Amino acid sequence: MFGLGNNGATRHLYFIRLKLFCSTTTTANAEPNLLSEFLVNSLGFSTEKAISASSKVTCLKPRNNHKPELVVNYFKQIGLDNAQIKMLVSPAPRLLFADVDKTLKPKIKVFQELGFSGPHLVRVLSRSGAFLRTGLNTGIKPSIEYLRKLLGTDGYVAKAITRTPGLLSYPLQRVMSPNILFLQNLGCSTLDIRKLILRNPRIFVQKTEWLEDIVQRVEKDFCISRDSRMFFYGVEMLSSLSKSNLEMKLEIFRSFGWSESDIITMVQRLPLCLTTSEVKLRNILKFYMEELGYESSYIASHPTLLMFSFEKRVLPRNKILELLKEKQLIKKVPCFYTVIKCSESEFLENYVLPLRDEMPEAEENACQHRGNTGGHFELKAGHGRGTPYPPTFCLPCSIVFFSQSVLVHGFRSMRGHSRHSV
């Protein structure tokens, strides 16, 4: 059944031994070895990790309906693979001895009643092992009811759980209420608090002292006031970064000559830009400042520039602009910020289609950056502006779209410094 050997008798003998797990004083010393053997042969644990996991299990009474193979089979029936089951049982291998019908199925049903199913259910379960070790009536159901009162609908409850899969393993009313009260005392509205819960529930299961420190740093270090619409985004940003990680990211900006004033301006406008990875920050700052000649003050006032995908959006669109300049297909080159913030559909509708014949290499360049996700299809007659494209029509979306009117009349001059145009 679990690939424990080619001989059926050997597998049968192995499970007989597993049934006797912890049954006598004589076999007590062998118990960890039996569970380790099961973890290695059934779930692909390494010997070292199997021994470590099995050492967490104390003596258990053998019961016919409390068998590790039954638990593993059930998890596989609902869609979990070996890697996901390992993730669930590694921190608490006693889960393998749970009663499937009386313990596991009722808890899984809670997720299903909230609307989780298929791959979505599997993703959440594989990341919420502690939930399966929480009491159904003493912890899980009261927490769900509390979330319903806070958020209003089961859809919002499911969204919060998706964001933080282990949410139901906490006694939510006890841990969340003090943090909600703290924010209310600051003057934060119920609606804003609800939005923050939906974006980042993890914030509300921390100690109130931790949240107080986060709020103080948002106000003191980055001068974001409580009445700013960016205040909660500042809280979210600082809650996701350790102090050392935050400092490393700030040092990247300083290494490119940014002043503290520029950094604060940027964070006040878009706090979540600091959640960008360090590698991406270095690459994108080098590109904007060294290749395009942008000044730190300009990027600080347009921080969304830091949020776009460097490989899939920034580089391909800049390449298309360079090709257009080279072939002199437009009279005036637009501000790159205008180009980069256009939606994919606007690009396709307004810019790519008119240039397929004049500049086929534009499509090739975009395909190189999209890999296998884009397609090449024929544009059928009768599908112009405002008309839905047929299912067979698609072009790589990371292409710059230059409208026919632009090709004829050129772009209107953009406001701002000329050096901010590509």
Image (cartoon, grey):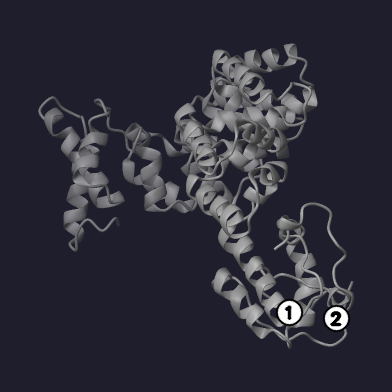
Q: How far from the left and from the top, in percent, is residue 44? A: 28, 51
Q: Which amino acid does the dot numbered 2 rest on?
A: His
Q: Give the CA separation, mark 1 to mark 2.
A: 10 Å
Q: Which amino acid does the dot numbered 1 rest on?
A: Phe
Instruction: Tell me the quarter of the picture where residue 163 sits.
Output: top right
Q: Please say if 64 is above or below 299.
A: above
Nearest the camera: 262 or 347?
A: 262
Nearest the camera: 358 or 24?
A: 358
Instruction: Tell me the quarter of the picture where residue 6 sits.
Output: bottom left
Q: How far from the left and from the top, in percent, is residue 420? A: 72, 55
Left or right placement of residue 393 versus residue 126 in this view: right
As drawn, the label of residue 75 is none
Q: How far from the left and from the top, in percent, is residue 166? A: 52, 33
Mark 2: give few (<14), some (14-19) or many (20+) Cα within 10 Å: few
Residue name at image x 66 percent, y 72 percent: 322
Mark 1 and mark 2 in contact? Answer it, CB < 8 Å: yes
Quadrant (top left, top right, bottom left, bottom right) of the C terminus: bottom right
Mark 1: give few (<14), some (14-19) or many (20+) Cα within 10 Å: some
As drawn, the label of residue 393 is 1
Residue name at image x 53 percent, y 38 percent: 254
As drawn, the label of residue 383 is 2
Q: How far from the left and from the top, in percent, is residue 240? A: 54, 33
- Is residue 301 something that shows in the picture? yes
Q: How many marks?
A: 2
Q: Please say if 203 is above or below 372.
A: above
Residue that lies at the very extreme toward the front in this rendered image: 418
Instruction: Tell me the quarter of the picture where residue 225 sits.
Output: top right
Q: Secondary structure at mark 2?
A: loop
- Is residue 394 something that shows in the picture? no
In terms of sequence position, does the residue under pointer 1 or pointer 2 come before the other?
2
Left or right placement of residue 177 versus residue 255 in this view: right
